[in-house]
Amino acid sequence: MSLELLSSTKVFDGRQQQYRHYSDTLDCDMRFSVFLPPLSDRMEKGQRFPVLYWLSGLTCTDENFSQKAGAQRMAAELGIALVIPDTSPRGDNVPDDGDYDLGQGAGFYLNATQAPWKSHYRMYDYVLEELPGLVEANFPVTGRRAIAGHSMGGHGALVVALRNRGRFTSVSAFSPVCNPISCPWGEKAFSAYLGADRSSWEEYDATVLVSRATEHLPMLISQGEDDEFLERQLKPNALEAAADAAGYPVRIEHHAGYDHSYYFIASFIEQHLRFHADYLLRP
Amino acid sequence: MSLELLSSTKVFDGRQQQYRHYSDTLDCDMRFSVFLPPLSDRMEKGQRFPVLYWLSGLTCTDENFSQKAGAQRMAAELGIALVIPDTSPRGDNVPDDGDYDLGQGAGFYLNATQAPWKSHYRMYDYVLEELPGLVEANFPVTGRRAIAGHSMGGHGALVVALRNRGRFTSVSAFSPVCNPISCPWGEKAFSAYLGADRSSWEEYDATVLVSRATEHLPMLISQGEDDEFLERQLKPNALEAAADAAGYPVRIEHHAGYDHSYYFIASFIEQHLRFHADYLLRP
């Protein structure tokens, strides 16, 4: 597993880098971005940082969050590394679809079981196993991981964290797709990737997973009340109801006037980073 | 002069808006962006904000700075409005050139005197007169203005401020083209827009203007030492030498390891906003 450095840029005294590598899991070349905080004065040699994984939404690559969220400022201050994967397998040999919400740019962080998707669309395994393995073998990071994301990536973060006890200290999401088995984006993608048997979909639905959870991971969700996808696609109320019924303490914050864009993320990313820092940096 | 609102998005409790209007100066439709800080608790009714005008660099529109600089956080906190014009006239009827550094996206903030450019390429007048007139007639702003920019826009900010005593409280620039009459970008653009007579170029050269200045405007320049355009295009040392010779107190800060990108701007935009706030918000 060799990493090719594509770019390295100084920002907030740390480094924003983009890498390319061949992914065995996805059977294609992949790009991801990393932000490494500056070394502190006290611990220059051998210093390692905990990692926040960020999963992006439909149509995004690793670059949207890197360029628009303004996360590096607070990540530098807190001493948290950021790792930002792409949102699907990519390339001429990777199946695609003309729509923005299926195929390349729309991997939905699951392992596809249906043709033609199943040979490449395994973002669940990539994000859970291959990418952390690569990151922990090649960068100055600890084994402490948190995970967060936006929209389709918020769905991915919640699902990956809820299904893997002990792998993440904490999870957060902006405007996540909370109940994909009953919204148009999810129904379309899950039908294509997972097939017609809806029982196989439930393992990728945060609302179902919360209702079954036995471990209570620290969880923060931020949702804008003027989000154009709120009612039809995101459904935080379904997750909130399931959490209430199951006694799962989810912190869901509704913000008046905010929409689905990166301006919303930029406005509250400091809060999310401080939330994760409470767990990532705990002695 | 009617303004058409294209979008309005909440960010850091303020509003990021994009407008379209017909520009008499440029004889075409133009877009610009505005950030309006949140109203403070004390002064909701009739509150007005001073304005920082931001001029962007080659190939940019009003969106690059809006999305990538992270300026809204500190502008909201300080109570400074941001106004971000496009970098040239635009449209099918506006002359263009295949190169990225001439024509649309490359207006160089001057008034062209040569065909085919002279009928539309009047960004100097647009930024100095038409746009502030429009902004001050339509938004809750005071008459206090500061100006800043990046690269070609840093050149524009310095030139507009240096030539117009009393119009701006302060000026700052990231990685500005300091001496365009003797760098490839400037020589190419000025030849096309202003013609072969180099004496006509000097009114658009910050290094020449600093050497002739009689008023000393507060001026901050930030330059990355790993900027790929530093030696060949930007030449801050020429401006620094002219300022030293003329006794003009310019604060030029050289930052090790930073390049020409928006990551550099994001890293120091708080410093620039605080610098302008000292003058914009002075009682």
Image (cartoon, coloured by chain):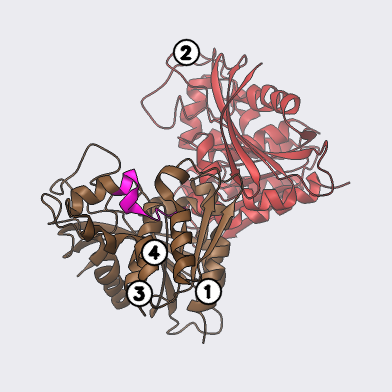
Chain colours: A red, B brown
Q: In this rendering, which labeled residue sits more in front, label 2 or label 1?
A: 1
Q: Which region shows up in magenta?
A: B175-186
Camera-side residue of A276 and A244: A276
Answer with left or right where residue B59 lies relative to residue B30. Answer: right
Question: Is A54 above or below relative to B196?
Answer: above
Is disc 2 surrounded by few (<14), some (14 to 19) or many (20+) residues within 10 Å?
Answer: some
Residue type beneath disc 1: Ala
Q: Is residue B185 rendered magenta in the image?
A: yes
Camera-side residue of B165 and A24: B165
Q: Name the residue under label 4.
A: B158
Is disc 4 surrounded by few (<14), some (14 to 19) or many (20+) residues within 10 Å?
Answer: many
CA–CA distance between discs 4 and 2?
57 Å
Q: Mark 3 points at which residue?
A: B139
CA–CA distance between discs 2 and 1?
57 Å
Question: Is B136 above or below relative to A79?
Answer: below
Camera-side residue of A144 and B141: B141
CA–CA distance between discs 3 and 2?
54 Å
Q: What element carries label 3?
A: loop
Residue farthest to the front?
B245
Residue type beneath disc 2: Pro
Q: In this rendering, which labeled residue sits more in front, label 4 or label 3?
A: 4
Q: Mark 2 points at which residue?
A: A116
Q: What element carries label 4?
A: helix
x then y, percent, for residue A53? 66, 37
Is disc 3 surrounded by few (<14), some (14 to 19) or many (20+) residues within 10 Å?
Answer: few
Q: In this rendering, which labeled residue sits more in front, label 3 or label 2?
A: 3
Q: Disc 3 is attached to a residue of which chain?
A: B
x then y, percent, for residue A141? 76, 34
> Which mark identifies residue B27?
none
Q: Disc 2 is attached to a residue of which chain?
A: A
